[in-house]
Amino acid sequence: MSEAKEVILNSLMSIWEGTLERVPFLVGSVVVLILTWGVAAMVSKAMHSALGKFAFRDSLVQLLSRLAKTVVWIIGVVAAAMIVFPGLTPSKALGAAGLVSVAVGLAFKDIFQNFFAGVMLLWKFPFEEGDMIECGDVCGRVRSIELRHTQIQDTSGELIVVPNSKLVTEPVEVLTYGKLRRIEMGVGVSYDTDVAEAKAVIQKTVDSLEKADADKGNKVLPKEFGASSIDFEVLFWAGSQPMEQREAKAEAVEKIKAALDDAGIEIPFPYRTLTFKEPLTTLLERQSKDQDNSDKEREEADD
């Protein structure tokens, strides 16, 4: 027992002495990491200010500054590892990093897929922060584009976090790509209306809309014969922001309805023609027939 106790104590003492010997190296590695953090922040700030002078896109500035920051951190981590493990060389560190990256890449495939998708989004700039986009069932304003995900705030104020791989592999509509966006509306008038007159009334109303852009031109086109109306297609341009689109459409509905009413042109309700195999009788006719039958039966009883 005494020999076993002595072996255990000697082992613990050797571990303690080895730890004490490594303390200066550990402190040095921590100092290097702290310096790396400061240098990375300085490099990111310097990249922002330098690239800002050349009027680069915000997404490109963010990408380049993040890549520079990542390079600084890689160098700092390798330097800290070489201080803790003096026998470690840059070539060995790169070889170990390669093996580790393969294992990590297989284990976290989706994370790396989103990371590289984020790089593509920031590099190719299909949209910027502040744009309104629609991708599948997600629609809202882009709040921030990170390397792994994009934050989108919908029109009701909810925040949606979308993986970047979804935005790269699926079609994305950038609703605010331009300052203007076309609005398409349908208007129906009754079949007894003069088509040319109705078109002139609607065209004049659309041309007078305050929220429509007159420079882009407005179109009113007879579209088709509807179930109970002659249908027109109304096309005009308004601001691309969601509220601008809604306000412009609301103004168009209000003024077109008023103009058609003033011109005596009907916007019809749906009409339905029903055909029955047997003739239908009204309630009064049925009551009258029942009364006649009752009178006839009473006369026959009296006889």
Image: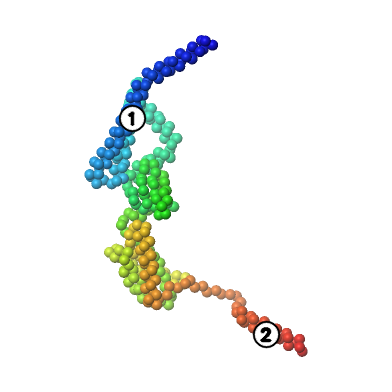
Q: Which percent across, then down, holds residue 205? A: 34, 70
Q: Considering only vertical position in the picture, is 180 above or below 8?
A: below
The answer to which of marks 1 and 2 sits earlier in the sequence is 1
Query: Can residue 139 be seen in the rendering of this structure?
Result: no
Q: Depth check: 201 or 109 in front? A: 201
Q: Which percent across, then down, holds residue 134? A: 39, 53
Which numbered tag is attached to residue 202? Answer: none
Which quadrant is the N terminus positioned in?
top right
Dot 2 corresponds to which residue? 292
Q: Considering only vertical position in the picture, is 79 above or below 15?
A: below
Q: Depth check: 240 or 232 in front? A: 240
Q: Residue furthest bottom?
A: 303
Specify the quadrant of the image occupied by residue 146. Answer: top left
Q: Which percent across, then down, holds residue 212? A: 32, 64
Which residue corresponds to the image point at 37% horizontal and 64% vertical from the top-left?
A: 249
Q: Considering only vertical position in the picture, is 140 above or below 191?
A: above
Question: Disc 2 marks which amino acid?
Answer: Asp
Question: Disc 1 marks which amino acid?
Answer: Leu
Q: Residues within 10 Å of mark 1 (few under 14, many from 20)?
A: many
Q: Secondary structure beneath disc 1? A: helix
Q: Secondary structure beneath disc 2? A: helix
Q: Nearer the viewer, mark 1 or mark 2?
A: 1
Which residue corresponds to the image point at 34% horizontal and 52% vertical from the top-left?
A: 131
Dot 1 corresponds to which residue? 33
Q: Residue furthest left?
A: 53
Which quadrant is the C terminus positioned in?
bottom right
Which residue corresponds to the image point at 36% horizontal and 67% vertical from the top-left?
A: 252
Which residue corresponds to the image point at 73% horizontal and 85% vertical from the top-left?
A: 297
* Colour treatment of the image: rainbow
Q: Depth check: 42 or 264 in front? A: 42
Specify the quadrant of the image occupied by residue 220. Answer: bottom left
